[in-house]
Each structure stands twice: as C-alpha cells, then as structure tokens.
Image (cartoon, rainbow, N blue to C red):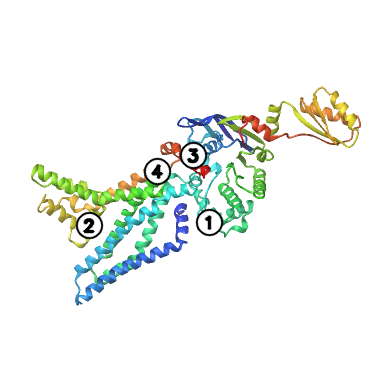
Amino acid sequence: MMMNPVLRREAITTLRTKRAYATLTLYVAANMGVVALYLFAMLSRGSYSFDPQNMNFLYLALAAMQLAFIFFSVPALSAGSISGERERQTLDLLLVTDMTPFSIVLGKLMASIAMVLLMTVATLPVYGLLFYFGSLAIGQILGMVAFLLISACMAGAISIFFSCVFRRTVISIMLVYIIFGFLCFGTLIAVFMTEAVYQSTYQQSMPVFTGFLILLGNPLAGFFSLAGEQLGTNLISNMFGFYWGGYSDAMPWYVEYFYLLHLLFDAVVILLFLLFAVWAVNPLGAGAKHRAPKERKEKKQKKQKNSAA
Amino acid sequence: MLEIKGLVKRYGRFTAVDGLDLSVADGSIYGFVGPNGAGKTTTMKIMAGLMSATAGSVQIDGVDVTDSPRILRRKMGYMPDFFGVYDNLKVKEYMDFYAGTYHIPYDKRPALIDSLLDIVDLSDKREAYVDSLSRGMKQRLCLARSMVHDPELLILDEPASGLDPRARVEMKEVLKQLQTMGKTIVISSHILPELAEMCTEIGIIDKGRLAAQGSVQEIMRKLTHKRVIYVRPAEQMETMLRLLKEQPCVGHVTENTLDAEFTFDGDDRALSDILKKLVMADVPILAFKEKEGNLEEIFMQVTGGNAV
C-alpha cells in the first residue's frame, strides 16, 4: 500500500528543518519540567511517603498540557496547509494530478496530526514515571492518547476547511481559535446563563439533558469526563449531578459515557469539515465557482499595486 | 485529440472566453497565441480541468473534461504560467512526490525520474534543492514533472516566459524532442514569432475569441491574400525579371542588387511552373523560396493592434 504522497512530502520537508527538532526538544523538556517541579515540590514538603492522589493530579496536569498544546499548535500547523499551497502557487500542480481532492485534504490532515502524534509519542516516557508509582494502567494512557488524537483531528479538519476557503492563513488561524474558544468557554457560559434563566423562570435547575446538550461539543468537558472516568472521580458526572441536582442515584447513560458521546460529536465534526474542505478545494466543484471572481479581483488589485509601485 | 466547442467563461459581467472553437490533431504542436488578457490562461485552465466553463465543452479523445476529470488528468500533463516549488525538497524528491500523486509504484520511480531529468537536461541536479534552481531550470523541471505519468497531451502555458535567450533555446530544444516522441502539445505564448517555427498549427486568440487558426503560412495567406516569393539568380537578373513580369500570377516585383522578391497569387503548381520556366530559360537559380513574412505585423493585424 502506498503512503499518501502529500503526507510523505510534508514529512520529508518538515523533518528536514531544525525548527521541528527544536520544537520537539522544547516540548519534551517542558513536560519533563512539569514532572520535575511536581516531584521537587512533593519532596520539599518533607514527605517521602507515596500518595496515589498526587500522581493522579500529575497525570491530569500532563494530559491537560497535551490538550492545550494540541489546541494551540494544530491550527497553526494546518490552517496554512491549503492556503500555503495557493500562496506558493503549487496548488494547481497538485490539483491536476491523479489525486482526488479528498486524498489531498486527508494527506494534509494526516501531515498536521503526524507532528502532534510524534510529540505525544515522544512524551510517553514521561508518563512512564506514573507507571513507576503504579497509579495508572497502560490502557488508560492509550485511551487518553486516542482522545487527544481525535481532538487534534477535529482541530485539524476545521483548520483545513478554513484554509481552503480563505486565502490568508492568519484569518484561518483566528477563526479556528474563535471556534475553539466558543466550544471551551462559550458553551460553559451558555450553561450558566441557561441555568440562571431556568432558576429565575421556573425556580428550579435546568434538566440535566439540556446541560449535556450544550456541553456536548466542549473539549474540556470531554477531557474531564474521560480523566474523571480513569481516575475514578467522575468530575463531569459530579458537575451534572450536584450542580443541577437533576438526579440522585441513577446516573443517566449520557452523563456516565459523556466522553464517548463527545468523541462521537468530534467524529461527526471531522467528517463534515473534511467534506466541506473537499467541496471547497475541488476546482470543478461548486466551491470554486464562488471563489473565481474574488481571485480575479485580488489579482487585479495586486497588478495595480505593482504598477503603482 | 482535443476538441473545444463554443467555450464560454464569464466572471460576473466580464467575459474572459467568448465562444471559442478549436481542434488539435494527434501528434501536433498547437501554438496558442494572443495578447495579455486575451483568455489563453483561462482556456488552458479549463482544458486542464482546473476551472469550470460557463458554457461549451472541452473534449479529449471524445471525453468531456468536466464529466471525467480524473481519466483526462491521466492523459494530460499541465504546466501553468506561474508556479512555485517546495522548500527543503531535492529535485529527485520533487519528482518522486509527483510520481506518487500518479500512483506510480516505488520501484519504477528511480528509472523514470532519471529518464525524465535526462530529457530536460537536469540529470546533474538530482541532489540539488528545487528552490536553489534557476528560473530556466525550474521551468524545465516543471516540464519534466508534467510528463511523469507519460501523458499523450501536454498543455504548456507560456513555458518560455521570463527566460533569458539561452534558456529559451534550451526549452525549445526540449519541446522539439517531445515532438519527436509523438506527444501532442498545446503551447501558449503572447509572442507569435517565438512559436511560429516549432508549431504545426497556431490559433490566434483575441478578446476571448479565436481570430485565426491554421498553419503560419495559411494564416499569412489568408490575411495577406498574396504570397511573397524570394528568388536569387547567380546571373541573368534582367532575363529573370522580364520572365517574372510576364507571368499572370505574379504581381509586384521588387528588385534588389543580388536578388528579387515578387508577390504571387496562385497555387503551388503555378509557382513550380514559374521556377520551371526560369530554369528552362537558362537562368541559374541559387534560391527560390516562399518568404515567411512579418509575423509581428500579422499578429497586430489579427488582434486589432493590441500591443504585445
């Protein structure tokens, strides 16, 4: 089976730069730094006894760091994937080949995820420390890596779609950050506002299902749901259960398996945005018809600018 | 091989291509000439399946470009007027990447890349980074890239633009080699004389319409109505001039010191008869040929005086 040519080329060109190795080194060093600081703090308290709770917190901190890194780095890596080809005047050369627009978009997505995967794998030895203390099973860590990769795919798919639509990479990056800002914090604010409306109107908490629906796309909620499940604290379930008091003993299945439903939401978003991206990049598709007059206008403006200079 | 019928491309109110009809035969080199903004690049992009037409059709071997773009992309190689290259990529890796985009197996690629680089005379640059190549070399590399899947048809949009005279000559040499390999080539330029000597047929496009089509000679004949013949005798200039003026198909005769030119309004048979008469009259003829005429003048005439 042949490797996607776009992925292969991106791997060659990216790994040939010193920047890639410098980023990788810095990232692993940052992860190591967090662990070292944590252990130093633990030992400086004079406690040489082992408390698994401490290791749970360290695991959470490391995984959260990975998630934050993904949300900042993936848009930066993928938002220029198609617009960069257009700016470099290599997109037409790619579109006239035997590759379908889908395989081009998929190659771009895989290329941006590959870097994240490399960084995640490079930091796995750091997690080895957690094994040393025996607080986590390997399956749990792999589960978290899978969650992080799916989150990276979602960020990548949205970024690539914007990269197909907008000519300027900066605009694509900004839009992806706005979307993720909304998903992480906007939905949280929406939950509190809805709760306030329910309290003032009906003098009771909103139904648990409403809160669940609003938070479904929230990557932080998905992350804490999974982490809670792995650490046995069930952070999100507690949030749903105690904050709204919608249920007492029986936890609804959609709360218990919130992280799985969130991942399903991610999968749908990935698929939709990849299809949108294919639609936008296809030169004979409907997306191209809307783009052509704009391209002509921009070309004309560039020409006028050059002649004026 | 290539058939374009009633091609129209509009951007809002602006019409870039306006009812273009043309056909290109197998194995020919078709020169697509026109001033800047005439619609050449738009037409070529539609041919390459990079743009959809507002109306009309582009067919390659009877298959419509918009109906089966993938099948046609396998038959066709395209070189755009402006293109970029990737940073941090060597020439052999660049070629390998495009070979991969056409699903050419890994084991067949090294030999293929070597042969293509040999055709474009870049064999010694295999290990060089593509962004370090000169403009002319990049143009040749792009041409090699467009042939990686051995297409029957090559669509080359101004391949010689921005090249210095030496690089232009080198590019022409490569194109001549491709012609001998039996490729059908559609090549555009805004400079007619640049194409005239290598093309079997040319089409002059102006304001999105085909203003003239045929061989250079045919177009000249159509536009000037008369052919200009150059003749040089070793001696007996007076006899030759007298004989020429007696011929019914010969119009104006211009006498120079060593040679002469005359306008001729007849077919090839009548022209050979004139040569025969001169030889029978013992005029020692050193040269007797049809002049190519002033191509720039014709181009300006066809395109309504648009500056090149």
Label 1: chain letter: B
The residue that disc 3 covers is A300
Image-based side of B36 in relation to A271, left or right:
right
- Dot placed on the residue nearer the N-terminal end, 4 or 2: 4
Q: Are marks 4 and 1 in contact (CB under 8 Å)?
A: no
Q: Which numbered tag is attached to residue A165?
A: 4
Determine crowd level at label 2: few under 14, some 14-19, many 20+ residues with C-alpha closer than 10 A: many
Q: Are marks 3 and 4 on the same chain?
A: yes
Q: Are marks 3 and 4 in contact (CB under 8 Å)?
A: no
C-alpha span from label 3 to label 4: 20 Å
- Inspect this view and state whether residue A131 appears: no
C-alpha span from label 4 to label 2: 33 Å
Q: How far across and down, in percent of the image, does residue A159 sit?
A: 36, 49
C-alpha span from label 3 to label 1: 35 Å
Determine crowd level at label 4: few under 14, some 14-19, many 20+ residues with C-alpha closer than 10 A: many
Q: Which numbered tag is attached to residue B93?
A: 1
The residue that disc 2 covers is A224
- Dot placed on the residue nearer the N-terminal end, 2 or 3: 2
Image-based side of B191 in relation to B291, left or right:
left
Q: Nearer the viewer, mark 3 or mark 4?
A: 3
Q: Are marks 4 and 2 in contact (CB under 8 Å)?
A: no
